[in-house]
């Protein structure tokens, strides 16, 4: 197996240079049996072992349980009143590998090669999956934060953090979770260097995260304009930020079929 991966690595070098070689597909193996990388390639975002660890913490066959946790706060209040729940309250999970690519690119645009000097935040962090993925990335971050409005998902994220701490060598960064909306007065984002917001129609503030006709997230734009420091890099998906943010780059990638199959990551700089 190791010989095969070494063979693929050199094929990657021939085909596209070090960057291509670094993105040899990760192994789908259990956490305890995933290989340890003695000297991980600098371009590698998650070692095969840590990538497998995300799937151990958040297996596909328990997605329905995470959906149920979201519905505890966001769905059933409507059902109890015999009202039709808004479709935008559907819980969604963003692809880990595309997320890692977007955040690493965002950090590069920020101009800091050493991510241990950069604080990361996931706005609308759900069950904490992407926050823990960020914290498991090679090189680490100064701190990885998750902000989630729904208490049931916040509790689940704290539980998963507890499990992650028991996985030797998994976490490379400090992690914290906050239960509030992105427009909450007590939320301080002044120290954040890179922010991520996966728009899947969920609620992350006092109002629905609605888009204008040209795809701009108005409430999020207003909240981040007031809270982020100039120069902060923000990644949004399939939605745009408005006044006060400069569009830097957009990258297309794969998403789950139920989320449309394809997704566009937009990278912004706070002015």
Image (cartoon, grey):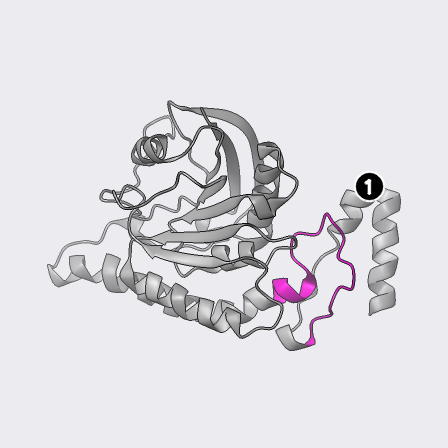
Task: Tell me what residue is drawn at x 40 percent, y 38 percent.
Answer: 190
What secondary structure is the stretch in magenta mostly built from? Answer: loop
Q: Residues within 10 Å of mark 1 (few under 14, many from 20)?
A: few
Q: State the extent of the magenta-drawn residues as a range.
A: 33-52
Quarter containing the N terminus: bottom right
Q: Secondary structure at mark 1?
A: helix
Q: Which of the pair 15/17 is nearer the observer?
A: 17
Find residue 140 and report its horizontal and vertical position in percent.
60, 53
Task: Tell me what residue is drawn at x 32 percent, y 31 percent.
Answer: 226
Find residue 269 and report its horizontal and vertical position in percent.
49, 29
Q: Report which quarter residue 158 is drawn in.
A: bottom left
Task: Tell me what residue is drawn at x 87 percent, y 51 percent.
Answer: 11
Residue 48 counted in the magenta span: yes
Residue 260 shows in this picture: no
Find residue 22 and report its horizontal and vertical position in percent.
76, 50
Give the residue pinned by disc 1.
16
Residue 97 counted in the magenta span: no
Task: Tell me what residue is drawn at x 89 percent, y 44 percent.
Answer: 14
Q: Which of the pair 199/162 is nearer the observer?
A: 162
Residue reaching furthest to the left = 81
Q: Report which quarter residue 111 is drawn in.
A: top right
Compared with residue 165, is residue 92 higher up or lower down, i.e. above or below?
A: above
């Amino acid at each position: 197996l190791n010989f095969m991966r070494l063979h693929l690595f050199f094929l990657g070098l021939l085909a596209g240079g070090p960057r291509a070689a670094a993105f040899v597909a990760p192994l789908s193996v259990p956490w305890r049996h995933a290989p340890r990388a003695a000297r991980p390639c600098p371009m590698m975002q998650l070692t095969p072992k840590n990538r497998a660890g995300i799937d151990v913490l958040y297996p596909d066959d328990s997605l329905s349980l995470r959906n149920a946790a979201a519905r505890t706060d966001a769905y059933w209040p409507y059902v109890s009143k015999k009202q039709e729940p808004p479709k935008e309250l559907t819980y969604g999970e963003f692809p880990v590998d595309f997320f890692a690519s977007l955040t690493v690119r965002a950090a590069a645009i920020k101009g800091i090669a050493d991510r241990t000097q950069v604080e990361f935040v996931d706005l609308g962090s759900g069950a904490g999956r992407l926050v823990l993925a960020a914290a498991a990335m090679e090189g680490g971050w100064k701190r990885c934060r998750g902000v989630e409005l729904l208490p049931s998902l916040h509790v689940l994220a704290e539980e998963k953090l507890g499990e992650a701490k028991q996985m030797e060598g998994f976490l490379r960064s400090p992690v914290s979770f906050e239960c509030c909306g992105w427009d909450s007065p007590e939320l301080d984002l002044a120290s954040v260097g890179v922010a991520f917001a996966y728009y899947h129609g969920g609620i992350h503030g006092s109002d629905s995260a609605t888009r204008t006709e040209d795809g701009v997230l108005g409430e999020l734009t207003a909240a981040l304009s007031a809270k982020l420091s100039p120069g902060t890099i923000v990644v949004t998906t399939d939605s745009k930020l408005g006044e006060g943010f400069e569009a830097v780059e957009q990258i297309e990638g794969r998403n789950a079929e139920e989320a449309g199959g394809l997704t566009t990551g937009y990278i912004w700089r706070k002015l």
